[in-house]
Amino acid sequence: MTGIGVEAGAQAARSRALAVLRVRGRALGVAVLPAGAAVILLTGASTGHFVGPGWDTARRVVGVLAVLVLLAAAGIAVVVARARPATTPTVPIPEESAPDLYRMVRDLADRLDVPAPSAIALTPDCDSWLEDRTHAAHGPPPRPAPDEIAGPGRRRTPVAPVLVIGSPFLWWMRVGELRAVLAPVIAGTGPSAHPDIAAARRFVRGLDAAVAVASTPGRCPLTRGLCAALGWTARLLLRGCREHATQMERGVAAAAAERAQAVDYGLRIVAQEQVGLAYAGWDRLLTRVALPAWRMGRWPSRLDAGVVAALTELSRRDRLAEGFASRLGERPACDLLEEPGAVDEATSLLAAHLFHGGPAESRSGWAPVDWQAYPEEVVDRTWRADAARLHRVLDALGVRPSLDPGVPDPGGPTLARVLDHLAEPAATAAATPDHTGHAGATGPQDPDTPAAAPLNPPADPGPAAPPATAPLAASEPDAQSAYDDEEDADRATERSAALAAGLSAELAREEAAVPDGGAARPGPETTLSTACDCVLPPFPLQPQRTARELLTDHVKAMVCCAAVDTAGALPGLDWLDGPSLLLGGERAADLTPRVLSLIEEGDPGPLRDWLAASGIRPEKPVRLV
């Protein structure tokens, strides 16, 4: 480490902080300018220099203007000073629940010769940073202390910021790796303690909070006008100090990185590899594993432990990651916590709230699920809910249970119904006898097949489904337009497009049908949005599924239900790919291309061959509840 580099970065940050404060000073000067002009005019009248009707009018106009400007400036200053700055939702870690972690952080701060962070919090993300929470709205005011620059009792020394640590780091990284990764972050408390940098940051955060206050909807017309003026002024000041604030933060980061080179520099290079690996595993776990559970009203309660399992699975599959598995014999950083299970559960619930919009606490219809129960509670229920929705849309489109009117009703929803509907007539005619015989397109294959019965009997009598999806069958251009882009529409048959449009409409109705009187426990045919009073997620994981993706997922779900009910398959959990179908104890990884062949080309041949080879009988009814 070179003291010149540290001092250069800190000096650059301080100079930029002074530039930010000069913007504040210029704004104050503009605010008092009319008052200064009014004072000059009044002084001139008292000395007999500015006399006459014109000067009297000028004094009155400038005086009124000065009063209005001062009142507006005072109001804006009060809002900027009192508005609550935005903070990242985190899980606070008290010192009594992680004494070893606090001890390690304080030891790092002592070695770096910087103030120790005031507290530690966890976030369900693969990142770490310092966050200032000294605003009065975030807690008790900081204790006054003499400043070594300003003199005793004249200014308050800024309280050290809070250290926010990504929770996946604690579970995947070893103690030494976490220490190396946190060193440059903790080193940032040194420049942050400078009074000018702290004041510049408070000013910028106050302006940002004022913009948020001005953008709050639902105000009366008069208040909206005042908020518009407030927002315009705050945005103008933000534009004036944006570049200086950006360069100030870069200077702080450069000074912190230079200072941290003295601590575990060699280990930090290795630890940075683990940061990228943890990020990849965490993203995969959230999008492939946690998201299906959240949609079903369940939130996995051990996400951080799951990322370790996901990365261990990656190490097993990828030869490039074999060396990472050997690290698991070392002490994990989560051992620095007294109760890692409780912390993992809290961060898992926060992740569901941030990335999916679920409630911030457990309630009816929003329950935790552990990894052992995940296949039954999430995978199987998701498949059967999607399959039930698929057959409801087929009912609305008027699709018969079988192509042959003379074939008895199978007595329940079947996969053959889906295959026959999506297959193009040319492809159906060209199919081999083995395909049609196994699929039951010409008749039932089992003499014990029950007699005709309602295809999908409702659990309880209720209002009929809206006929909004029925016209889609007769209006193919409208069905094609339901696809999100021309590429998807070009790769879909007319029947696939109509069915996808019906599924999109059905899913939209379910999401809009929020029950009155609070949250209800979701059934297998409801989604999380219909079961609880959730909010839009601040950080959505994925864009909304396209109509083609929606249809693909529903057809795959129907195939999986048939495999479970007729071939003894089992629902499973793959740590990297999410819900999976286990046939004979092996994961079925070649299903998607065959489903896409059916949807995009209307060719059921590859899927029927796969079903026959796997012993799955599509003509058999499946259970949807």
Image (spheres, grey):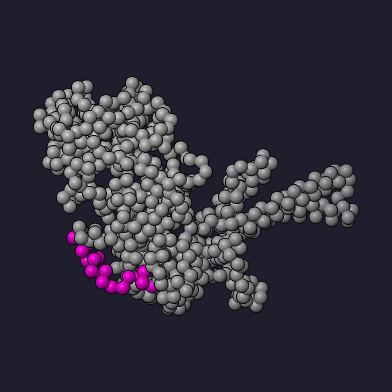
Depth check: give the residue in front, 509 or 148. Answer: 509
Depth check: give the residue in front, 113 or 216. Answer: 216
Q: Which residues are magenta?
A: 319-336
Q: Residue at x 32, y 70 (%)?
A: 332
Q: Is residue 255 visible?
A: no
Name the spot of residue 94 as percent of width and height, x first.
Answer: 48, 70
Q: Is residue 474 visible?
A: yes
Picture mark count: 0
Q: Quadrant of the C terminus?
A: top left
Q: Residue at x 61, y 47 (%)?
A: 214
Name the spot of residue 234 as percent of width and height, x first.
Answer: 60, 50
Prevalent SS, magenta region: helix
Q: Quadrant of the N terminus?
A: bottom left
Q: Residue at x 41, y 72 (%)?
A: 338
Q: Residue furthest left?
A: 433
Name the spot of residue 156 as percent of width and height, x first.
Answer: 62, 71
349 vs 336: above or below: above
Q: Residue at x 31, y 24 (%)?
A: 398
- Relative horizontal placement of residue 217, taking residue 271 as reference (left or right): right
The reply to whether the magenta stretch includes residue 181 is no
